[in-house]
Amino acid sequence: MKNRRPSRTVRRQRNKARAKVQDQTLIWPFIVV
């Protein structure tokens, strides 16, 4: 059975992925300029 509420590990992994995407979006303009 899957828990409706995501566990801490899952949440941490999602936060890591989200941070990676944000870093890429921040880095992209610098590369273009």
Image (spheres, rainbow, N blue to C red):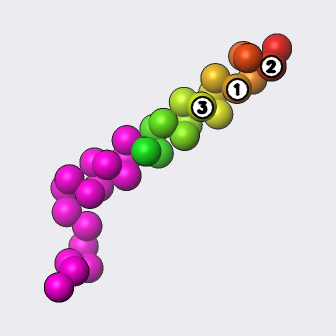
The residue lying at 24 percent from left, 73 percent from top is 5
Quadrant that contains the C terminus: top right
> Could you say where residue 19 lies in the image, as x and y percent from the top left?
46, 38
Is 12 on the left-hand or right-hand side of 33?
Answer: left
Confirm whether the magenta stretch covers residue 15.
yes
25 horizontally vs 33: left or right = left
Residue shown at 26%/57% (left/top)? 10
For the N terminus, the quadrant is bottom left
Helix, strand or loop status at disc 1:
helix
As measured in the structure, the alpha-carbon distance from the residue carrying label 2 to the one carrying label 3 is 12 Å
Tell me which amino acid carries mark 3: Gln
Q: Which stretch appears magenta?
A: 1-16
Q: How many marks?
A: 3
Q: What residue would you read off at disc 2? A: 32
Label 2, label 1: how many angstroms apart (C-alpha)? 6 Å
Q: Which mark is residue 24?
A: 3
Of helix, strand and loop, which one carries label 3? helix
User: Tag 2: Cα neighbours inside 10 Å, few (<14), some, or many (≥20)?
Assistant: few
Query: Dot 3: within a 10 Å radius of its alpha carbon, few (fewer than 14), some, or many (20 or more) residues?
Result: few
Q: Disc 1, disc 3: CB below 8 Å?
A: yes
Is there a contact, CB below 8 Å, between mark 2 and mark 1? yes
Is 5 on the left or on the right of 22, as rendered? Answer: left
Identified at 31% across, 49% down, the residue is: 13
Residue placed furthest toward the bottom: 1
